[in-house]
Image: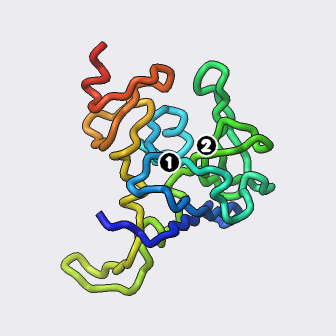
Amino acid sequence: MSKPPSPVVITGGCNCGALRYSFTLPESRELLLANNSTCQCTLCRKFTGTVVPDLILCQVSWMTSPLFHKSPEYRTYDSNVLPDVTGRRGFCSNCGSSMCYHTQSIEELTWFAIYLGTVDEEILAGKAIGEKDGKYGVRTERQGGIGHLLCDTTNSGHLFVENAVPGWDMKGRKIWRMDEEKWFSTIEEGREK
């Protein structure tokens, strides 16, 4: 698997552009990542409108642009994910884009998880460099892109797999419920009690 040039700068934002971010992975950070995951809890599914939301954990200290959490367009939907833990799902109040998840207040924020669907297209899929006519019509040709690395959960895992959709392929370790703290290699292994 190809490794992107260093440093790795990840940019993204909401649909309307009101909320933007840029962060640089530390030089010591290896890709494949160990700080990304899918979350299959019902709250994240309904918040993002996708079966398996992908997230990457970002330290506030990695940010190379002002923290979008302080923008007037930034809002949160708060819910209790576990006893005594408030989950804050951040979104743009203009366009509705689901942006991130965090448990800390904005004033105390040290980390947050960004939904990978908000990462810029050039970073995920590669820069469009032209078009080519093919068997099924015109297709965009792309160069670069590290979405395959950002979304690979081989070294990280999947959260709340008790809600997993049967047949969905998930690489990497799995945790049945966040409050159990036990990781499994397969969903079937997690079902065995």
Marks 1 and 2: CB-CB under 8 Å?
A: yes
In the picture, measured across the screen, residue 153 lies left or right of residue 187, that is right
- SS for dot 1: strand
Looking at the picture, how far across and down is residue 4, in whole percent? 41, 69
Question: Does residue 154 sit above or below 138 in this rendering?
Answer: above
In the picture, measured across the screen, residue 28 lies left or right of residue 101, that is left
In the picture, measured across the screen, residue 175 lies left or right of residue 92, that is left
In the picture of the structure, the residue carrying the numbered disc 2 is 101
Quarter of image, res 3: bottom left
At 32% from the left and 67% from the top, the residue drawn is 2
Kind of residue at badge 1: Leu
- SS for dot 2: strand
Q: Is residue 118 visible?
A: yes
Looking at the picture, how far across and down is residue 7, in whole percent? 52, 69
Q: Which mark is residue 3?
A: none
Q: Which mark is residue 55?
A: 1
Residue furthest toward the left? 135
Sequence-wise first label, 1 or 2:
1
